Amino acid sequence: VGEVVTFTLTITNDGPDDASGVDIQDIVPDGYSNITNISAPGSETAGTITWASQAVTTTTPLVLTFDATVDAPTGTANEYLNVALITDSDQFDPDSDPATDNTVDDNGDGIPDDDEDTAVVTPQAADLSIAKSIDNTSPNVGDTVTFTLVITNAGPDPATGVAVEDILPNGFTLVSVAAPGTADIPNNTANWTTLSVPANNGSVTLTYTATVNAPGVGVNYTNAAQITASDQFDPDSDPTADETVDDNGDGIPDDDEDAITIPPATADLSLTKTVVDGDLTPLIGQEITFQIQVFNDGPQDATGVEVTDVLPSGYDFVLFSSTEGTYNETTGIWTLGNIASGTSETLLIDVLVNPTGDYLNVAQITNSDVFDIDSAPNNDDGDQSEDDEDNAVVTPVAPISDLSLTKIVVDGDTTPLIGSEITFQITITNDGPQDATGVEVTDLLPSGYDFVLFSSTVGGYNETNGIWTVGNIANGTSETLLIDALVNPTGDYLNIAQVTASDVLDSDSAPNNDDGDQSEDDEDNAIVTPVASSADLSLVKTVVDGDTMPAIGTEITFQITVSNDGPQDATGVEVTDLLPSGFDFILFSSSTGSYDENTGIWTLGNIASGTSETLLIDVLVNTTGDYLNVAEISASDIMDPDSTPGNDDGDQSEDDEDNQLITPVDAIADLVLEKTVVDNDITPNVGDEITFQITVTNNGPDVATNVEVVDQLPIGFDFILFSATSGTYDETTGVWNVGTIPNGRTQTLFIDVLVNTPTGTPNEYINVAEVTASDQLDPNSTPGNNDLSENDQDDIQVFVERADLSLDKSVSNVNANVGEVITFTLQINNAGPDIATGVAVQDIVPIGYSNITNISNGGTLVGNVIDWTGLTVDTGGLFVTYQATVNLPTLEDGEYLNIAQITASDQFDPNSTPNNDDGDQSEDDEDSSFIETPVTDIQVTKTVSDPNPAIGDVIVFTITANNLGSLDATSIEILDRLPTGYRFESSTATSGTYNEVSGIWTLPLVTGNSSQTLEITVEVLDIDDYVNIASLISLDQVDANSDNDEDQVTIDTICLTVFNEFSPNNDGVNDTFVIDCIDRFPNNKLIIYNRWGNIVYQKEGYDNSFDGTSNGRAVLYTEEKLPVGTYYYILDLGNGSPTRAGWLYINR
């Protein structure tokens, strides 16, 4: 663009006569301007140059020229297409008409005329753009950064003479420019000149370095770079215009410049220092906390931040805590690191206030990597005038505390019993104003007490020296010591306590200065007056239930009750009750203590005042012996005011002794037997467990001994186990050895049995039990006499539940197809007489089905097995269903045979057994159903559109898939892999898709008694491999007839080879354009064109005679040979087949 070009017009005259009066016109398009140097006598008007009345001889061409400047492209069509034409001539021109118009086909014959011509220039163009980046988008002041400029050429031509300029703003100082650039340090400018940038998105990369200057008023960080020169036209920017981002003034930022703004990181750090809780007058020795807070008011994050706070001599470091970083108490440096913009970090330093020293504590920010806009780190001049430094000072004061002490006896028990425990309570209170430290209290127990234990709210107590080490007592708080002591019979009972030590001055008392009167408030005393203890014990002995005339051989119970009427608790209490010969000891129970039947001693221990304790002794009444039973209190640690332990003189005259006399009699026992089924379960199912309960009751009046019961189980039951309140049961003999049954007592036997399957034997479910032995007389029955009317014998009958179950199975469609969803129905019938519970059914799904769904009645599927459990079937029956999808047939036996059976039932079934199918479904509780194997018949046929094509012809194979069956065929695959004699062109199918690589035609469906068609269009190649086979290779169903699954066709090609190159030089070799076998097509027509589309040769009935000589009308001298080059032909064989087109090359 901008270059001056010269256009040359050459006018030739092929005669035979010289031409005169020739007018030439050249229409210059909008892509050029500044038309100059026009050959005489030409003139230019409005972009059209005209030469008039020129002469052109047959020997010398007329040459005309003019210059024009190439303008920038505007996108207008043909803006660089320059047309020149001859507009007039005195002579006739046999192949053009100058006077007609200004087109390139003036005479309207469809052939471009040679009295006009065009010339087109294509201006070089380079679409340059610049992209600028920086290696650190958040630099700090003083950092050295690298700027990178990438110059990219998206144009079609290389860019040359490219210049780039980057003038740095005052926010940066130029350091260096990488080659081939130059650094203009005084003008802070980086320059590059004479750069070359490759075309088609080629690029060059330029770099330079600069340092970041500190911010300030008028400091700018927007850095712009631009392309300032290029030899080539740029379609969307103007490098030479100026230094803005819209050089060409079109209002759109140009891509030959770029700018970035990278201000340095700045942070506004400030620091405050305070004493937490404002405690500026702490006590000497007290801990206080300094709080240092550092704020970053931004706008950028601060990095590498350090604060120094070295503690002065007035403080000792205790510990620190911080929201960020660590504090070194030796150097005083708090290493924070980073502080985000708009955030703060806090350091807390706990210190101990010393008695003397410097109390002014200064903290300042001593380091930060990021520039601070209003302060400089580590420049404190002592006045903390900047916002990044601060101080805190305290004025310590000496501590004072007011300690007072009180001493009392807990519960006011100042007249305790000798030997009892009392508790002294010592309370020390600090009324401030400061905390007290190092506090000790002394309370050494006098001789009237023995130390037992202590407890305290703080510290420990030493009972040897009497010192309670209290430690610290906060202002306004109290601490308490409790001392448990045993009151001795004699001794000193005045107990004194006083504060004997404190680190802190007391405002109104001095520790450890008691002069005996406890006159100060830090000392106090307590005194008690002990008294002796007594307990009034009494004893009462009876026979439980007043049974003073028991039957010989029965059990009775003696009850001994000891009461303490006070006033004090009794300790060390013992009672003696040694059984006489008329009784045998069985067992005892007591509310406290234990009884030794050999010594007769009941060891009670302690009995609280106002309470009593009881001993029960069970004994057997002997036939003869002493029946007077005496009991007395034989020991007690505490004085009894009206009796003396262990002094019985035989008359039991004191209240701590008593007796009981009984008179035994002979025994009668009325035994009653009752038999039931637990939970009244008299209608069980076969296989159930039930429990027989036999109870034997003694209605007295005497104990029954050596009792036996017989319960022989009938064949309807199998013994499992027994349990009994007394004795054992022998399941073989049926004998229950009950043993002894006291009057009014009952013994029970439980026999767990399994209900057997009915056999039809009479009374197989009637169970009889009878008392068969007893030592005592029974007034209304005789043991072992098998008299069901007596009350020592009973029976019970159970009735086994029955349910006659059967199963029928059906399927919704016995002729279902592959992929079809069918429903299986299982009908469970109950012919009674009882409702069936706990029914389980199992259905084993064979491999011919999958996708089992919609299982009703809570059935579960595991693997290929469906189980229904816990079903209840009344006499109306029950239906369960599920659905399954028919799978592809595998021809495996039984793949569609589906079997189900009843596998469980709580009730007995009289004519079938659950879960015993042996494969033939012979019982009525098992059944099967099946569907017919899906069968269809796919016939494959194949035809070809032309069985005798020529090489290069396009032919069509037609493959038809006929479904001769009534069942739909699915997922069909037919293989038609083209042999090497064909090249695939395209395919169409009425259904499915054809893959030309694998050769497989995939059809999802061919309905019954219908067909689908595939057409494959191919080009016939010159390779003798033409047998084309189509065969059925897959479908979901079984194919009933494999004989019609395949078909094939073959073709017999005709020769029609075109020999594209020939050399018509009369050497006798390849002198003509030959088409093999063209003589077979006498009606053919051949037309040959040059590259401009002009017919140079044509012939009907072509016979391989074209030797490169033109017979076209556009050629004036037909006897001349056509020039070397490429030509194009169209061949119509004249037999209705498609025309053929191609190229040929003449080489002379």
Image: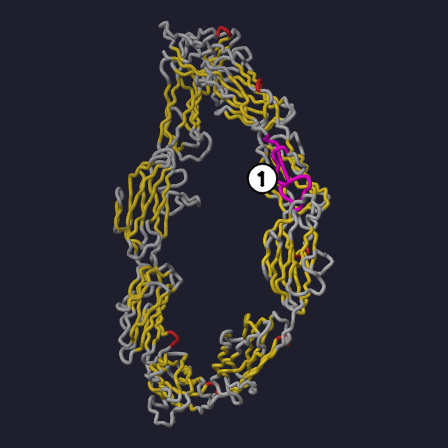
- Which residue is more in the foreground, 5 or 346? 346
Q: In this view, does 88 lie above or below 781?
A: above
The percent coordinates of residue 274 (x first, y second) are 36, 73
The residue at the point 56 percent across, 41 percent down is 862
The residue at the point 61 percent across, 35 percent down is 918
From the image, which quarter does the N terminus lie in? top left
Q: In which quarter of the image is residue 19?
A: top left
- The residue wearing badge 1 is 865
| Image side of residue 350 versus residue 816, left or right | left
From the image, which quarter does the C terminus lie in? top left
| Image side of residue 934 versus residue 101, left or right | right
Q: In which quarter of the image is residue 387?
A: bottom left
The percent coordinates of residue 48 (x first, y second) are 44, 28
Q: Is residue 373 above or below residue 803?
A: below
Query: How packed is label 1: few (under 14 Cα within 10 Å), some, or many (20 or more)?
Result: some
Q: Is residue 1063 above or below residue 804?
A: above
Residue farthest top in this picture: 1068
| Image side of residue 585 versus residue 507, left or right | right
Q: What stretch is highlighted in magenta?
A: 894-920
Classified by dominant secondary structure, the portion drawn in magenta counts as: loop
Q: In which quarter of the image is residue 1063?
A: top left
Q: In this view, does 769 lie above or below 1030?
A: below
Q: Which colour scheme is used?
A: secondary structure
Dot 1 amino acid type: Val
Q: Is mark 1 on a helix, strand or loop?
A: strand
Q: Does the magenta stretch include residue 507?
A: no
Would residue 575 be visible to someone looking at this image?
yes
